[in-house]
Amino acid sequence: MRPKVSIIVPIYNVEDYLARCLDSLVAQTLEEIEIIAVNDGSTDKSPEILHQYANKDHRIVVINKPNGGVSSARNEGIRRAKGEYIGFVDADDWVDKEMYKTMYESAIHEQADTVMCAYIREFGTHSKEKGFNLPEKVCFRNEEVQSRIMRRMVGPLNEEVANPEYLDAWGTVWSKLYRTEMIKRNQLQFIDLNVVGTNEDSLFNIHALYYTQSFLFLNYPFYHYRRNHNASLTSRYKPHLIDQWFKLYHHIESFLVEKGMQHDFHRALGNRVCLNLLGLGLNTISTDNKAPIKMKLRKLHAILNDDRIKRYFRQFEIRQFPVVWRAFYFCAKIRFSVGLYFMLIAINWLRRSIR
């Protein structure tokens, strides 16, 4: 019998978290699932744990491959998927036992190509739900999917820019179910993170939502996303991040041009570029960047004076922001690198202390 849902789990050196993830998947109240566990060349005890679970539950399909990164692991899972719908779970996260039953049945009832749920951020010492200001259930159809959901993943417009921390809240793949036929017919795949740095999820979703005729949002926090701050932009320094991100923007822009998307999409992308200045700044001042303060200031100055950054900031409106964010992006707009540096220090401290 064909599975109703294929759940793709990329696995690389997650021995401390894998059992919790797998426990949450085998306990799903939707029993007609396959769990495609892609071992991406793990060197810890993850393969041993994985095969222990596979021996107990025939629904777990183990794929062993050389290490190629999370995108290649997900792509391999897509190739092997047999279910009506495809979902993605990261191996250090876990899900509510009702997640896939509720999402699958809702997808069938609404004839949805893509379904999304809310999620909870897990910090170890506490949990915090990511709030979405929407009803418990809302469905978008046809052109409305592209104009409201896909466009939001390209970038924010108008009052949406006021909350930079929500830039990619919609863009995660692990909070969604996708109709398998839609993914395979359009040959949708994840791009290598070595190319784009981050946001491979958002890029995948932009493509998927272009082909989505019905998008269903369920405002229930079924997914538990473990926040690992040691691996975040605030700590792990990526010296080539600006060039990687402009490759990401190029991929998005090329797709928009190819599909003839209207001016609002290009304006939204420009806003994404400007808002992502926060990520570039936090990456630059990262404690993992061992350069002296003078060199960090010089790097910030170079970023602010990059011709591509300056071009987008000329059109960037900051009046929608609350006072603190307005001050931050004003410093960016006028290329005041010293002021921006101290604001980044403060933002980084607040992110770590409040969470």
Image (cartoon, rainbow, N blue to C red):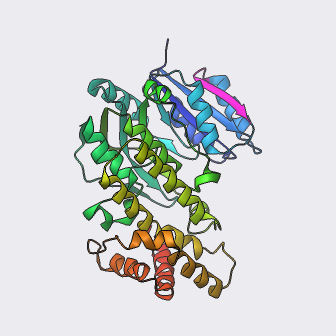
Q: Is residue 58 above or below residue 234?
A: above
Please identify the residue farthest to the right as the structure is shown: 43
The reply to whether the magenta stretch includes residue 64 is yes
Quarter of the image for the C terminus: give it. bottom left
> Magenta: predominant secondary structure element?
strand
Magenta-colored span = 57-65
Q: Is residue 80 above or below residue 347?
A: above
Q: Nearer the viewer, residue 248 or 168?
A: 248
Q: Nearer the viewer, residue 9 or 30?
A: 9
Please identify the residue farthest to the left as the structure is shown: 135
Q: Position of residue 39 (x, y in %)?
A: 68, 36
The reply to whether the magenta stretch includes residue 278 is no
Q: Is residue 191 above or below residue 350?
A: above
Q: Position of residue 317 (x, y in %)?
A: 30, 72
Q: Nearer the viewer, residue 314 or 106?
A: 314
Q: Nearer the viewer, residue 80 or 213?
A: 213
Is there any visible trace of residue 223 in the rendered image?
no
Is there any visible trace of residue 276 in the rendered image?
yes
The quarter of the displayed image where residue 48 is located:
top right
The quarter of the displayed image where residue 270 is located:
bottom left
Q: Is residue 22 above or below residue 271?
A: above
Q: Position of residue 8 (x, y in %)?
A: 55, 33
Identity of the residue drawn at 58% across and 37% down: 9
Identity of the residue drawn at 38% across and 51% down: 153
Please identify the residue farthest to the top as the structure is shown: 1
